[in-house]
Amino acid sequence: MTILELKNVSKFFGGLAANTDISFSLEEGKIIGLIGPNGAGKTTLFNCITGFYPPSQGQILFKKQNITGLQPHQICRLGMARTWQKVRPLVKMSVLDNVMVGALCRTNSLKIAREIAMEQLKVVHIEHKTNMPAGGLPIGERKRLEIARILATNPELLLLDEVMGGLNTSESEEIIQLILETKSRGLTQMVIEHDMKAIMRISDRIVVLNSGEKLAEGTPAEIADNQEVIDAYLGESHA
């Protein structure tokens, strides 16, 4: 079943077209990769999907409901959550309290929020850092904390924006395994990533943006063999 559908979505900033006429859909339980050069419009599209920017044109359907123009908190309560390129922990609060903030999207009970937060910290393997100020975590654990916080909102769709950015090989592998484990539990995901080995491993389908437009869409194998994508982004060495 289709959980997310974009219909001719465009976003303009004055005379600048950041996204132009983008259409694709995402099936429930699948992972779709979103790739393209810097400035291709990937994060802008995430911002439109999650309500941080209203699309200038087009429609966004989530679980068959038109969410175009809804506010981020409304979309989150419908079951969609996202991370950011630059992690944004509440640095003076504890790791546990950071995740409780996400859980309080679903409950007014601090007791229940604490239980949800502890469960998600175990999922991302940082439950031993519960009482540490979030600002004291290294970058790899900050990334996992952000994933725990959005998982605590009980989402059906995760949007992950360069969640492996700035990580070493070992830390990236931990995130890859976490993404695949999350998929095995039935969660749908859309992932922006520049690590092509990673995106090819985790994605069921890939959408390629270039200069704000959709350049190509297909399986990882189809994208790796697409000459337009090779010329615009991957390069012959990746091919």
Image (cartoon, rainbow, N blue to C red):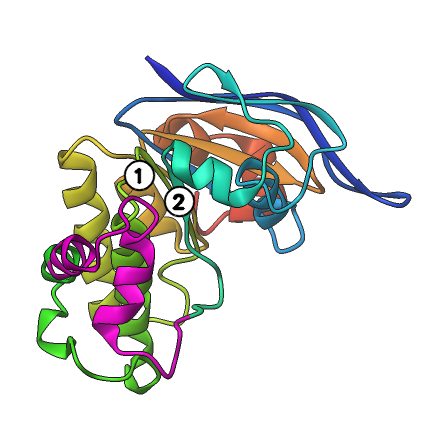
x then y, percent, for residue 18? 74, 43
Left or right of 194? Residue 122 is: left
Residue 76: image tag: none
- On whether residue 97 falls in the magenta region, the answer is yes
Report the predominant secondary structure element of the magenta stretch.
Answer: helix
Range shown magenta: 89-118
Residue with the mark numbered 2: 81
> Local crowd at mark 2 within 10 Å, few (<14), some, or many (≥20)?
many
Residue with the mark numbered 1: 155
**Residue 223 versus residue 146 in the image, above or below:** above
- On whether residue 237 falls in the magenta region, the answer is no
In what quadrant of the picture does the N terminus appear? Answer: top left
Is there any visible trace of residue 168 in the rendered image? no
Camera-nearest residue between 160 and 196: 160
Which residue: 71% across, 42% down?
211
x then y, percent, for residue 98? 31, 68
In what quadrant of the picture does the C terminus appear? Answer: top left
Give the SS element for disc 2.
strand
> Local crowd at mark 1 within 10 Å, few (<14), some, or many (≥20)?
some
Which sits earlier in the primary sequence, circle 2 or circle 1?
Answer: 2
Furthest residue in direction front, as rendered: 109
Is there any visible trace of residue 98 in the rendered image? yes
* Disc 2/disc 1 C-alpha distance (Å): 6 Å
Which residue: 58% across, 49% down?
43
Check contact, mark 2 vs mark 1: CB within 8 A: yes
Q: As shown in the figure, which amino acid type bears the numbered disc 1? A: Pro
Which residue: 26% across, 47% down?
107
Q: As shown in the figure, which amino acid type bears the numbered disc 2? A: Ala
